Amino acid sequence: MFLIVGLGNPGKEYEDTRHNIGFKVIDNIAREYNIELNRQKFKGIYGEGFIEGKKVMLLKPATYMNLSGESIREVVDFYNLDNTEILVIYDDISLEVGTLRIREKGSAGGHNGIKSIIAHLGSDVFSRIKVGVGQPKGDLIKYVLGKFTKEETVILNQVIEVSTKATAEIIKNDVKTAMNQYNGFKANTIV
């Protein structure tokens, strides 16, 4: 089984914020592959189904961002998963809005959700799709907990679709194939 995790914060007030782009991608994957996110366990909301003929679990941790690792650790322990069977999708302020980057491993890059996952897994070796949300011009916390503009939302809808395709490519083939195909993606800007 492959665990696909979207990072975000629980609660209505965080629903359309930059920090919750991982949740948005998970919701899109769930729609695309008819996977219902209707179970509560592992400190999160999840659903199970199939992508490219392979069993997957989609997970949205119900902890706050900086505790995401707790939820993932519970799933990993319960299903005895290997880190190579984990994909985490999250926001990245070092990438422009509308871009994505796929990695097999790496540091947290200042992202508290990823720091928590690395700490709970004891390793930085797990696949990621980083979705660009742009650089803050002021206060970081206010920025990542802020909402996207209308223009950014149009661009983001494209990158959410491509993130869904990249996820399927990772499941079907592997991370390197997805990296070759999707790294460097930049959504069309619409004025």
Image (spheres, rainbow, N blue to C red):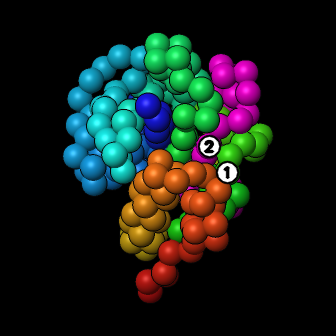
Magenta includes 63?
no
Give the side of residue 170 with respect to residue 119, left or right. left
Residue bearing mark 2: 127
Residue in the picture at 49% in, 81% down? 189
Q: Amino acid at mark 2?
A: Ser
Looking at the picture, tell me which residue is in the foreground, 86 or 69.
Answer: 86
Which quadrant holds residue 101? Answer: bottom right
**Is 131 part of what is drawn in magenta?**
yes
**Front residue of 32 and 96:** 32
- Residue 25 horizontal side relative to residue 131, left or right: left
Q: Residue at 22% x, 46% y: name it.
A: 34
Do the residues bearing badges 2 and 1 touch, measured as CB atoms within 8 Å? yes
Residue at 29% x, 37% y is: 49
Estimate the x, y position of residue 105 in percent, counting from the top left.
72, 42
Q: Quadrant of the C terminus?
A: bottom left
Residue depicted at x 27% and y 24%: 39
Look at the numbered disc 1 and give the secondary structure of its residue: strand
Going from N to C along the chain, the mark reached first, 2 or 1, is 1
Tell me where residue 41 sits by quadrant.
top left
Residue 138 at x, y = what percent?
A: 68, 55
Report the amino acid beneath label 1: Arg
The segment highlighted magenta reads 115-138
* Residues packed near mark 2 inside 10 Å, few (<14), some (14 to 19) or many (20 plus): many
SS type, badge 2: strand
Image mark for residue 103: 1
Q: Which mark is residue 143?
A: none
Q: Quick check: can you spot residue 123? A: yes
